[in-house]
Amino acid sequence: MKKYFTKAVALILCVFCLGFTACRKNGEDELKFTDYAFITESASDYKIVYPEGSDTSGAVYKAARELQKYLETATGAVLPIVTDTGLSFSEDGQYLSVGQTALFGGADIELNADELQSSGLRIKTVGKSIYMTGAQQYGTLYAVYEFLNRVFGMETYAADETYIDTGVTTIKLPDMDVTEIPSFNYRIGKYGVYTPEFRDLMRVHSEERFIAPINGTLYHNSFVALPPDTYRSAHPDWYSTDGLQLCYLAHGNQAEYDALVDTASSVLLEWLLASPNAGSITFTQEDYDTWCGCSECAASKEKYGVDSATAIHFVNDLAVATNAKLRDAGDPREDIIYWLFAYNKTETPPVRQTENGYEPIDDGVDMRENNIGIIYAPILMDYTKPMTHANNAGYRDIFEQWSSITDNVYFWGYDTIFADYFNVHNTFGTIRENLKVAKENNAVAAMLQGQHDQRALTCFNNFKVYLAAKYEWNLDEDYNELFNNFFDNYFKDASETMKELFNSLTTHCAWFADEYSVYGQGGIITITERNFPKGAIGNWMELIDRAFRDIESMRISDPEAYETVYNRINLESLAYRYMLIELYGADYLDGELYQMKSDFRRDCGRLGVTHFREHRTIDGLWSEWGL
């Protein structure tokens, strides 16, 4: 599938050697250039340098290769890649230095590791060379992508859509001094469309990049760490009265509590040592809305008013024990974050209100000393409204409460209707506002969970993937600019029609949500005749037909791009065709309805739709439809 599209407008703006003007990021000053030749008629004396000994499967080596690949795409010039062996800094050296090379070491460039953390980046021109690096390896990869974005307008919109200005055969060396630190240090892409390559281009992580899994499990893993079948017979006090959770106080049995801490810390040590690059690990309750009912846990709840206090007490002790074992093992990591859940019974923290906000009820539930982090997952929130809305005031207040006892918050939001993937979940306008609230309340990590098991996304979810990634990197991005750039590049000649469809659809969804007080929670199916009249669906199908007509000229001018955009429009049509079948199937003759269902099934198969609800493959829908 074609990945790079040359636009006449971009060429007019960006080709000429001395008059070259790079596409700019939102709010950035125009890119400046030195007098030094960089690329002249698709040839260059420059070399790409990376540190000797870099892991060839790692992000730094990948950064060098990506820089070479996309420079060739943009300019036609092929720059050789070399290691820094035998090289040293020189004002006259002609290099693109990637990572903390020997050249970088002599260039006297400030690199504040505490400020940059795992993803921040530095780009600086010194003499005739440009240095691109981060404090850590992924910061270096993102520095390369930032360089390509600022100089050649490179932008990724979808897994199969990366744009870069092409035809720039002559250009002077850019004069750059850039520091970028993302709004969230950890940005998780939780959609099934993400591949490792797409994640890197969008500057998002998989959770395993910063969390050490326990035997492959990241969440709801207390029983993975301490399986009941292994331990319950010898240690019954480790488990809750209903057997569905741990008892984090071991029923008040001090000897059993000490054994629980010791055993669990040995498990965490094992998996931290197996993930030497991870800076955190989770120890989180099982996925049941229940808690231990023993007398010790009941006394804790009476004292603190919430169940979460028992988990905080335990994980504080667990962190102390695990850190001691890490030191004994010679592991150099400090400040490991130990994550626990604010979810179901543990959603509310043990705090009291003061004149200035909130504070921990006592030192025993303060999470800062041992670097305990909270994964705040308000699963029942109305995500079609921002946290600043009255509907969600309680959830915002809980966010503020948690931030009063920990400096490490991981915001786990929900961005789809999990009960039916063909439902429109109108959260496009709330993503930024919810992330801003998260940022204001000590969030260092953010993840908006969407259709994580779905390969092909309808209901404009590909735009949602793009929005979430852009805002997780930079909360100051302008929505209208993101909207226009995405639609223009993703739908191309059908952009204006698809914008009209999107605006009509989201306006309609906002209308019925307010008109009928529809609560936009991820388990509530909104496809009803009341919410989606047949006339409205018909209007959207007319816009789909118009979009197909818009791209007809591309069938001749660019057949490959035509096929790509045709499939994207067809993918969006599935939601409205599904509504017609589900809500108004009785309006059609049996043969006509069967054909509609058969065409829908064919297109789902051809486009790669794998699921129709969370954990349910699309075959379940065909069974429901009698196909």
Image: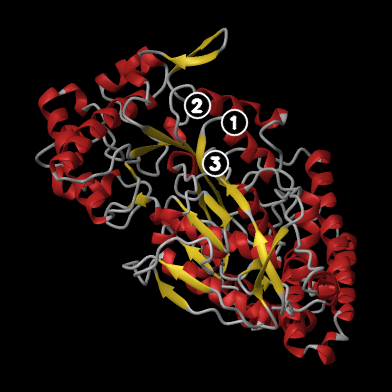
Q: Residue 440 has which mark?
A: 1
Question: Is 541 above or below relative to 142?
Answer: below
Crowding at mark 2 (Cα within 10 Å: few <14, some 14-19, many 20+): many
Render colour scheme: secondary structure
Give the residue drawn at x 54%, y 41%.
Answer: 379
Ranked by sequence position, the earlier of labels 3 and 2 is 3
On screen, residue 211 above or below 393: below
Residue 560: x and y in percent read 72, 87
- The amino acid type of the residue labelled 1 equals Glu
Distance between mark 2 and mark 1 Cα atoms: 9 Å
Who is closer to the viewer here, 111 or 272?
111
Contact? badges 2 and 1 (CB < 8 Å): yes
At mark 1, the secondary structure is helix
| Residue appearing at x 64%, y 53% in the figure | 470
Residue that protrudes farthest toward the bottom in the picture: 556
Residue 377, compared with residue 100, is above or below; it is above
**Mark 2 falls on what kind of element?**
helix
Please tell me which residue lies in front, 40 or 161. 40
